[in-house]
């Protein structure tokens, strides 16, 4: 939701986002030194159901920290425990404190006592002796980050500043939370295009034109729904364009649909107006080719010789060979070459075989070992694919040996 | 149903105009600089394409109804291996191409729907080629006539409005490979004649002997050699393109 309150605000917020991306921001006063070796180890939620999502940036090395509307509503009663560490043992007599700004504000970080405008009235952690360099913890209420109701409709940053005093030197690091409680506006739904088992939904979105990273989601159902019930029904993944095709629908059934906009922090807009439409039967080219009293003669498919021999593309043996092709042959370059060559050479031969019953019987006999091996191979559990070439090699060796034995026996006789 | 195609005439006219601009270098040339060996020809060519699918029927025109009567662009790449150089060149060529027709499916009342439907085509071909480039090689005469003949495999797949491979009501899948043959006649224009020095440099530095603009007409018979269970993807196609010999 950045960039919606004028250029000045935009620049400021963009800066905050950048600082959040770095993970640790310098104090808002130029020249203020950062805490030596500072590292935020993690942010953990305490309370029932307080498992923060990834966008909250709770893990070590997280580069941004975001609170959106959904999280705000879900975690408002949670407590956040932050753990940080220093790069070296603190000097004797060192101390630390934590200040938290109001959303959109900042705190003075040059001492422990001056808060500054835009800073919360009470220190999150009052001045405390800094006795260790690791596993230093403090906690604060999640609601303090939000600073008000989740419905405030604003996108602001809350800064949590950790200030360290060593000797007479104050150093500080600030963790910036982007508290984006401003949802995008609803897109405007356009008339749906009715297709065969599908509906193409389109929308316009001039209201969110200034938003960065806007995406959309389509909700749909066979009945009317609203903001409260939309999650009970089906929805699309996030969409980057301004149209979406809902597939695998039933022709003649009325479907209701609406679209929402989603900003870069996963805030969803309210639903657009509901629309409704019904998929209709449509003949695509090939259906039109094969439809009607004058049916197109093309039989389609690729398993030419086996189809000719077994009489149907849907025969079990043909199915076994198709599975073998897809699972073993098409997964390697030599296999793909074999399949391509087969496709190039077999149709005329298949045509010839199909016209001669004797040839069909002989072909089925010749294909029997192939189908057997294919059936055996396709029944192998996952991870045993290596056994297929091994089996083929062994089978070829056996065939060569058997041929040799047979030839010798024939010569002797 | 087929309309007269003005492209061949226009293209040939353009080639002729180019030829007229060539200086009178068609007389016997001086002893040419030593040329690098010629072994291959690579072509890229474009043209309009429309198959004879509807010829199969007496009472319906599924291709025209869904894709219209317009022509679709087809793009082809071809590599030829030249294995004979005497009076002309004899070569063996392999080609691959792609074309796509897009349209809208038909509603039950026969009107067009908003649902899209597509037909993808990937022609593969093998050709035996003869190019009469004797005059071009010996006298720098810039025209090279040629003929080709060979076998083709057209891989194709039809998509429905959901982008899936179409399946007819009787379960027949809308994809396949259809085989056939082709015969081609064409004329190449030797661009080297326009800039001999540049052509010489091209050969010296890159090994490209000759560069041609060409136009050709192809008769395709793609119906699995008259099979009774195959779609007729035959066509007559004019194509034009650029070729380099190296």
Image: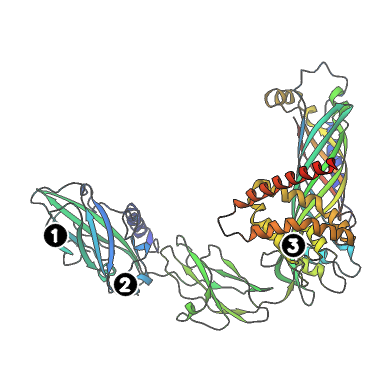
Q: Position of residue A131 (x, y in %)?
A: 12, 54
Q: Chain of mark 2?
A: A
Q: Relative to the observer, which residue lies in front, A365 or B202?
A: A365
Q: Relative to the observer, which residue lies in front, A325 or A30?
A: A325
- Badge 1: how crowded within 10 Å, few (<14), some, or many (20+)? few
Q: Position of residue A219 (x, y in %)?
A: 53, 75
Identify the residue under disc 1.
A114
Name the residue: 46% across, 75% down: A270
Identify the residue under disc 2.
A75
Name the residue: 66% across, 77% down: A279
Identify the residue under disc 3.
A318
From the viewer's perspective, is the residue at label 2 or at label 1 nearer? 2
Tags 2 and 1 on a common chain = yes
Name the quadrant containing residue B69: bottom right
Task: Inspect this view and state whether residue A180 appears.
Answer: yes
Name the quadrant containing residue B108: bottom right
Q: Chain of mark 1?
A: A
The alpha-carbon separation of the residues under discs 3 and 2 comes to 57 Å
Q: Is residue A186 left or right of residue A249?
A: left
| Cβ atoms under marks 2 and 1 closer than 8 Å | no
The alpha-carbon separation of the residues under discs 2 and 1 comes to 30 Å
Tell how many labels. 3
Tags 3 and 2 on a common chain = yes
Q: Relative to the observer, which residue lies in front, B53 or A50?
A: A50
Q: Position of residue A55 (x, y in %)?
A: 37, 62
| Cβ atoms under marks 1 and 3 closer than 8 Å | no
């Amino acid at each position: 939701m950045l960039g919606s309150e004028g250029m000045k605000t935009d620049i400021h917020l963009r800066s905050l986002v950048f600082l959040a991306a770095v993970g640790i921001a310098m104090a808002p006063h130029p020249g203020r030194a950062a805490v030596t070796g500072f590292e935020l180890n993690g942010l953990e939620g305490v309370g029932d159901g307080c498992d923060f999502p990834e966008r909250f940036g709770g893990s070590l090395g997280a580069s941004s920290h975001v609170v959106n509307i959904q999280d705000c509503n879900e975690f408002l009663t949670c407590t956040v425990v932050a753990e940080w560490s220093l790069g070296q043992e603190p000097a004797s007599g060192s101390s630390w404190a934590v200040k938290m700004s109001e959303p959109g504000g900042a705190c003075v970080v040059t001492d422990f006592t001056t808060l500054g405008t835009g800073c919360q009235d009470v220190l999150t952690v009052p001045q405390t002796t800094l006795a260790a360099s690791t596993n230093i913890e403090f906690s604060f209420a999640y609601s303090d980050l939000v600073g008000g109701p989740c419905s405030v409709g604003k996108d602001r940053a809350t800064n949590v500043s950790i200030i360290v005093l060593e000797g007479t030197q104050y150093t500080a690091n600030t963790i910036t939370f982007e508290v984006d409680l401003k949802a995008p506006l609803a897109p405007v739904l356009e008339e749906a295009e009715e297709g065969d088992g599908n509906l193409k939904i389109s929308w316009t979105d001039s209201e969110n034109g200034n938003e960065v990273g806007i995406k959309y989601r389509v909700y749909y159902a066979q009945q009317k729904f609203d903001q409260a019930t939309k999650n009970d029904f089906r929805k699309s993944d996030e969409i980057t364009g301004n149209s979406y095709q809902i597939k695998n629908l039933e022709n003649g059934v009325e479907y209701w649909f609406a679209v929402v906009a989603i900003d870069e922090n996963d805030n969803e807009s309210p639903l657009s107006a509901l629309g409704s439409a019904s998929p209709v039967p449509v003949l695509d080219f090939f259906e039109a080719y094969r439809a009607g009293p004058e049916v197109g003669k093309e039989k389609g498919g690729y398993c030419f010789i086996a189809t000719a021999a077994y009489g149907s593309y849907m025969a079990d043996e043909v199915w076994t060979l198709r599975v073998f092709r897809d699972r073993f042959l098409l997964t390697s370059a030599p296999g793909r070459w074999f399949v391509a060559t087969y496709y190039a050479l077999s149709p005329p031969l298949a045509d010839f075989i199909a016209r001669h019953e004797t040839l069909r019987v002989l072909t089925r006999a010749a294909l029997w070992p192939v189908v057997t091996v294919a059936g055996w191979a396709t029944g192998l559990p996952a991870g045993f694919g290596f056994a297929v070439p091994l089996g083929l090699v062994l089978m070829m060796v056996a065939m060569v040996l058997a041929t040799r034995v047979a030839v010798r026996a024939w010569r002797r006789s | 149903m087929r309309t007269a195609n003005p492209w061949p005439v226009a293209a040939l006219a353009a080639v002729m105009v180019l030829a007229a601009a060539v200086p009178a270098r068609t007389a016997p040339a001086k002893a040419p600089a030593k040329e690098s060996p010629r072994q291959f020809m690579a072509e890229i060519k474009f043209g309009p394409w429309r198959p004879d699918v509807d010829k199969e029927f007496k009472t319906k025109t599924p291709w025209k109804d869904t894709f219209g009567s317009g022509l679709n662009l087809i793009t082809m790449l071809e590599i030829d291996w030249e294995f004979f150089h005497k009076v002309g060149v004899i070569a063996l060529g392999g080609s691959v191409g792609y074309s796509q027709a897009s349209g809208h499916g038909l509603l039950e009342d026969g009107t067009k729907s908003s649902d899209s439907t597509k037909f993808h085509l990937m022609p593969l071909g093998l050709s035996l080629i003869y190019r009469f480039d004797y005059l071009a090689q010996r006298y720098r005469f810039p025209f090279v006539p040629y003929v080709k003949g060979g076998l083709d495999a057209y891989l194709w797949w039809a998509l429905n409005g959901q982008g899936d491979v179409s399946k007819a009501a009787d379960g027949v899948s809308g994809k396949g490979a259809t085989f056939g043959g082709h015969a081609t006649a064409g004329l190449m224009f030797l661009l080297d004649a326009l800039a001999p020095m540049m052509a010489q440099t091209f050969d010296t530095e890159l090994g490209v002997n000759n560069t041609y603009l060409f136009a050709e007409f192809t008769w395709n018979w793609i119906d699995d050699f008259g099979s009774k269970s195959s779609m007729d993807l035959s066509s007559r196609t004019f194509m034009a393109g650029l070729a380099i010999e190296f």
